[in-house]
């Protein structure tokens, strides 16, 4: 079975991206550039015993996504405890709304955003009362 075990977010400005994901989601970063042969920072997204995976920020190797362009890769979705306060942090730190908060009835609140690097990502707050 091919279980997802790692993700990479392509970025133009590594320091800006580290600050955004660190400030909004509390991620920490480890410099793995020596192994990758380019600017590459491992993203620790939570405790090892917590559900989820770790990934990395890597230096973008091509053109940045353009506004309104169709998504041409995977969109990572982060689980959050408080949707509205997370959205406020995303906007405060330079993110933009791509698809506003909506209910997955009886399951959760979901929405999508664009980070300062032009990448689309989602946030997801479980809530059995969502409607």
Image (cartoon, rainbow, N blue to C red):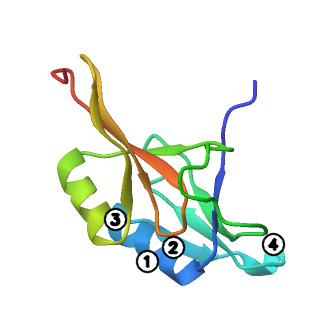
The answer to whether residue 80 is visible is yes
Residue assigned mark 1: 19
Residue drawn at x 54%, y 50% is 68
Q: What percent of the width, then of the height, locates residue 110? A: 33, 35
Residue extending farthest to the right is: 37
Q: What percent of the width, then of the height, locates residue 119? A: 55, 57
Residue assigned mark 4: 36
Number of other residues with Cα within 10 Å of mark 4, as a class: few under 14, some 14 to 19, many 20 or more: few
Q: Say if 11 sits above or below 33 in the image.
A: above
The answer to whether residue 82 is visible is no
Q: Secondary structure at mark 1?
A: helix
State yes or no: discs 2 and 4 in contact (Cβ < 8 Å): no
Q: CA distance from mark 3 to mark 2?
A: 11 Å
Q: In the image, is 94 to the left or to the right of 125?
A: right
Write down the quadrant of residue 131 in the picture.
top left
Which quadrant holds the N terminus?
top right
Residue extending farthest to the top is: 106
State yes or no: discs 4 and 3 in contact (Cβ < 8 Å): no
Q: Nearer the viewer, mark 4 or mark 3?
A: 3
Residue drawn at x 72%, y 79% is 39
Residue extending farthest to the front is: 68
Residue assigned mark 3: 24
Indicate which disc, 4 or 3, sits on the residue closer to the N terminus: 3
State yes or no: discs 1 and 2 in contact (Cβ < 8 Å): yes
Badge number at residue 17: 2
Indicate which disc, 2 or 4, sits on the residue closer to the N terminus: 2
Residue drawn at x 24%, y 45% is 81
Indicate which disc, 1 or 3, sits on the residue closer to the N terminus: 1
Q: Secondary structure at mark 2?
A: helix
């Amino acid at each position: 079975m091919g279980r997802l075990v790692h993700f990479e977010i392509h970025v133009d400005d590594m320091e800006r991206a580290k600050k955004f994901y660190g400030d909004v989601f509390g991620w920490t970063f480890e410099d793995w550039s020596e192994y990758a042969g380019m600017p590459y920072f491992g993203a620790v997204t939570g405790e090892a015993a917590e559900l989820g995976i770790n990934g990395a920020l890597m230096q973008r190797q091509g053109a940045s996504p353009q506004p309104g362009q169709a998504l041409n890769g995977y969109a990572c979705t982060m689980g959050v405890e408080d949707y509205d306060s997370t959205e406020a942090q995303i906007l405060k730190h330079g993110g933009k709304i791509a698809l506003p908060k909506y209910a997955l009835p009886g399951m959760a609140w979901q929405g999508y955003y664009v980070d300062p690097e032009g990448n689309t990502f989602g946030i997801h707050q479980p809530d059995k009362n969502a409607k």
